[in-house]
Image: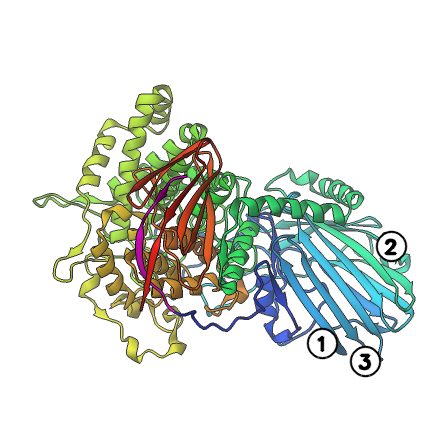
């Protein structure tokens, strides 16, 4: 083992005071009491999913609370309805249809009666209550001791999972114990199709109004061992079968009310199975419920009901314990790959585990689905996929579970033909333009100044492809997907931009919107131009690589897309002539041509209740000012680290921090990372805390509509890119780690080039361990480190000086 002396100076802040919504625990969140007024928030946080199915964390039983305090939700990733967008003032090329993720029939429902009294937490007396979501087992469990108005005391224990290993399945185990009485119990298990999507008109982050009921009942089955609905969407024409089945040795089916009477129930929206049991004091009865969703996005519509019945028949035979054990094994393997350990701050440890777990629950992994801004936990942003995936979320999966990163890029390749069609709609005669927000592949952004105008989506996807190929030697993806995607999307820049004709000649890109949604339709947005430059240079690199190493495939692809030598030459000219705005007087990089000429927003006289600004000011009012919703120029500094000096990064950070509201959940993690890089560790720590616990503590006050997946992934970026100082520069891996004073140590690991590297930083040293793979080379600051089978560990001493 080599030991190299090293000195690193840093500042830190005291722990930032936060009000924590839940007790601090590294591996779970626990709700210690029931409060109907906080249902909405808990339903998002306690949601379960597996990348295909998402179930909001509503209780099995229905409780009536204040209006708007609860939102039932059961979702399928990629299953959506489409409705035409109505424009009172129309224009050519505007997005024509909106997609929205549908709320599907609810199979979680259970209603319990103790003799003639209904178990209802809104009535009677709660003696004891605890609900917890365990990140290591993947099970949501709840234990309630309740006393009825007539004095009967009962304990109800429910366990719920959405299977990571069986993508169509969820399961519930429901146990009832009579504490102080003997009586006849009745349990009604339901499949309820009387559901609707959340509709609000006052917050663009939530959703738009649906004009017609989106689901039409086609068929139903009500059999003793299987209950199922088949629905069809009105516009998108998708079919879905929702079904449930049960196993129990304790309950008896009440045939008088739960029989196979399809004719009488043909028009019903609720299918139910009724069970009865005579229970003695101190005894328990248990029922297991299995549910599944199958859609025509995966299987022929005519087979869905039969597939569901067979699937649940096998699930009943295998039992709840089987799926619980497979869930535990899957998560054990995941945490071995992905775990981030923080010693010394339990709030942050809980936050990052919570975020990693929800990312795993939210991400599509079949190559046909992606990851929505709110995952599968709620209907915020209508279930749309954004650039969040490529820039914020893909790095976490690329370095933690790379096979999922590949499927996210496969989804983009699947949508390449629709991206070509969108390019034609936007006036581009060739090339492909990916949608700003979508589910099914077409552009769904009705407000184009802050949506469709964000052409950087093309460069974001190319950047993700570049990251993936630098971390994985995936020749099949390169030759069958990557090159075609990168070249087709790079063509757009030549048509969108133009050479100015000045001396020296520069390449300009006008009328676009960068990441900052408070600044729209500008000329030469720095982020867009810089990423477009990288995109075209990367396209050239792939041209050279395929010409040299895969000439037959190169000819096949360029013939397919009719790419010309003139275009290839133009990429080089445009990239090397790209205009990147810079203000010599302020010595900072300008966000765009006109940004620094605008009046600075009056922050001093804007009260807290008027944030986020987008809910209180007309867009034009915001656009006229120097005010940023989120990191824009700073994001370019993170993604293109070698294009700025450290002093430039400091000056840029200081200027843009003063005018950024962080109204977007995408912002604080980027500021944390750059603050760590420039040595402002107090701010780095504060922004990191805000990112890590954004949903747990509901700091943006909209977690009730779903968790924020990009911010969750940003937490991992803060650890690896921020405090770990990880960068890929010219294809080479670099680290420049620092240690916040509050922590005893932290560690994370990455998978790269078919190797697994563990990085552990404490007050004495940084230790690198090669835990898989034959060899890995990287930089620790300016020092080259090589790990291999002979030397798997490398320890570098730190002398850290803390100062205020």
Of pointers 2 and 1, the one earlier in the residue sequence: 1
Q: How far apart are marks 1 and 3 (CA)?
A: 11 Å
Quadrant assignment for the N terminus: top left
Name the residue beneath numbered marker 3: 149
- Write down the residue under mark 2: 259
* Lower sequence index among marks 3 and 2: 3
Q: Nearer the viewer, residue 405 or 473?
A: 473
In this rendering, would 571 be left or right of 252? left
Q: Over which residues does the magenta segment extend? A: 1-13
Q: Which is nearer the eye, 540 or 144?
A: 144
| Rendered position, 486 above or below 57 | above
Question: Quadrant location of residue 628?
Answer: bottom left
Q: Where is residue 517 in the image (x, y as percent from the top left)?
A: 34, 60
Question: Image quadrant of residue 412?
Answer: top left
Of callouts 1 and 3, which one flags the residue occurring earlier in the amino acid sequence?
Answer: 1
In this orientation, which residue lies closer to the viewer: 214 or 579? 579
Q: Name the residue under label 1.
A: 122
Q: In this view, does 673 lie to the left or right of 50?
A: left
Q: Position of residue 534 (x, y in %)?
A: 28, 42
**Which residue is more in the foreground, 578 or 297?**
578
Residue 422 magenta-highlighted: no
Work out whether residue 294 can be spotted: no
Helix, strand or loop at disc 1? loop
- State the separation of the CA atoms marked 3 and 2: 32 Å
Q: For label 1, count other residues whose C-alpha is less than 10 Å away and answer few (under 14), some (14-19) or many (20+).
A: some
Q: Is residue 212 visible?
A: yes
Farthest-out residue, top: 552
Q: At x 80% / y 72%, what residue is drawn?
A: 118
């Amino acid at each position: 083992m080599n030991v190299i002396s090293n000195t690193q100076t840093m500042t830190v802040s005291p722990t930032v005071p936060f009000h924590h919504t839940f007790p601090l625990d590294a591996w779970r969140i626990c709700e210690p009491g029931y409060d109907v007024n906080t249902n909405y928030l808990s339903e998002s946080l306690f949601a379960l999913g597996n990348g295909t199915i998402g179930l909001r964390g509503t209780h099995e039983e229905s409780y009536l609370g204040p209006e708007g305090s609860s939102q039932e939700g059961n979702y399928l990733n990629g299953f959506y309805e489409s409705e035409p967008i109505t424009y009172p003032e129309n224009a050519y090329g505007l997005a024509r249809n909106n997609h929205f993720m549908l709320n599907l029939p609810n199979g979680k429902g259970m209603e319990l009666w103790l003799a003639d009294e209904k178990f209802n937490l809104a009535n009677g007396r709660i003696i004891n209550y605890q609900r917890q979501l365990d990140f290591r087992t993947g099970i949501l469990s709840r234990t309630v001791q309740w006393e009825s108005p007539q004095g009967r005391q009962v304990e109800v224990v429910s366990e719920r999972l959405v299977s990571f290993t069986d993508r169509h399945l969820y399961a519930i185990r429901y146990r009832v114990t009579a504490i102080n009485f003997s009586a006849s119990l009745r349990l009604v298990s339901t499949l309820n199709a009387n559901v609707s999507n959340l509709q609000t008109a006052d917050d663009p982050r939530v959703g738009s109004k649906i004009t017609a009921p989106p689901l039409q009942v086609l068929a139903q089955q009500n059999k003793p061992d299987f209950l199922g609905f088949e629905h069809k969407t009105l516009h998108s024409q998708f079919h879905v079968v929702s079904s449930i089945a049960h196993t129990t040795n304790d309950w008896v089916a009440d045939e008088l009310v739960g029989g196979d009477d399809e004719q009488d129930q043909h028009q019903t929206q609720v299918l139910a199975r009724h069970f009865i049991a005579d229970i003695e004091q101190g005894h328990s009865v248990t029922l297991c419920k299995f549910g599944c969703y199958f859609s025509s996005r995966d299987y022929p519509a005519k087979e869905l009901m039969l597939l569901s019945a067979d699937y649940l028949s096998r699930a009943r035979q295998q039992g709840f314990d089987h799926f619980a054990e497979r869930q535990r094994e899957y998560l054990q393997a995941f945490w071995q790959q992905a775990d981030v350990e923080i010693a010394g701050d339990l709030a942050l440890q809980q936050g990052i585990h919570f975020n990693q777990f929800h990312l795993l629950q939210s991400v599509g992994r079949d190559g046909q689905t992606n990851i929505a801004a709110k995952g599968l936990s709620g209907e915020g942003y209508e279930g749309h996929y954004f650039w969040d995936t490529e820039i914020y979320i893909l790095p976490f999966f690329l370095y933690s579970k790379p096979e999922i990163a590949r499927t996210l890029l496969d989804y983009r390749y699947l949508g390449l033909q629709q991206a070509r069609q969108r390019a034609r709609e936007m006036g581009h005669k060739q090339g492909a333009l990916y949608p700003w927000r979508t589910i099914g592949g077409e552009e769904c952004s009705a407000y184009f100044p802050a949506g469709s105008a964000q052409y950087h989506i093309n460069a974001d996807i190319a950047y993700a492809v570049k990251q993936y190929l630098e971390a994985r030697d995936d020749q099949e993806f390169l030759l069958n997907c990557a090159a075609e995607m990168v070249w087709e999307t790079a063509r757009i820049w030549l048509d969108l931009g133009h050479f100015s004709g000045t001396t020296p000649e520069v390449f300009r890109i006008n009328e676009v919107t960068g990441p900052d949604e408070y600044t729209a339709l500008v000329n030469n947005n720095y982020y867009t131009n810089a990423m477009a430059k990288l995109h075209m240079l990367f396209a050239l690199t792939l041209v050279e690589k395929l010409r040299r190493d895969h000439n037959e495939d190169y000819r096949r692809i360029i013939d397919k897309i009719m790419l010309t030598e003139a275009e290839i030459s133009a990429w080089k000219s445009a990239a090397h002539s790209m205009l990147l705005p810079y203000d010599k007087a302020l010595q900072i990089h300008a966000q765009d041509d006109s940004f620094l000429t605008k009046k600075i927003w009056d922050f001093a006289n804007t009260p807290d209740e008027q944030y986020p600004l987008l809910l209180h000011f007309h867009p034009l009012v915001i656009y006229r000012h120097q005010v940023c919703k989120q990191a824009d120029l700073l994001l370019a500094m993170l993604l293109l680290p070698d294009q700025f000096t450290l002093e430039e990064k400091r000056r840029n950070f200081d200027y843009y921090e003063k005018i950024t509201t962080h109204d977007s959940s995408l912002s604080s993690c980027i500021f944390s990372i750059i603050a760590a890089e420039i040595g402002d560790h107090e701010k780095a720590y504060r922004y990191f805390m805000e990112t890590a616990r954004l949903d747990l503590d509901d700091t943006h006050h909209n977690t009730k509509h779903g968790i924020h997946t990009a911010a969750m992934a940003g937490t991992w970026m803060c650890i690896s890119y921020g405090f770990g100082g990880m960068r890929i520069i010219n294809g080479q891996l670099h680290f420049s780690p620092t240690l916040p004073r509050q922590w005893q140590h932290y560690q994370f690991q990455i998978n790269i080039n078919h190797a697994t590297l563990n990085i552990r930083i404490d007050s004495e040293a940084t230790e690198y361990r090669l835990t898989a793979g034959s060899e890995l080379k990287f930089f620790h600051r300016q020092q080259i480190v090589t790990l291999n089978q002979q030397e798997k560990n490398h320890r570098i001493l730190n002398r850290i000086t803390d100062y205020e």
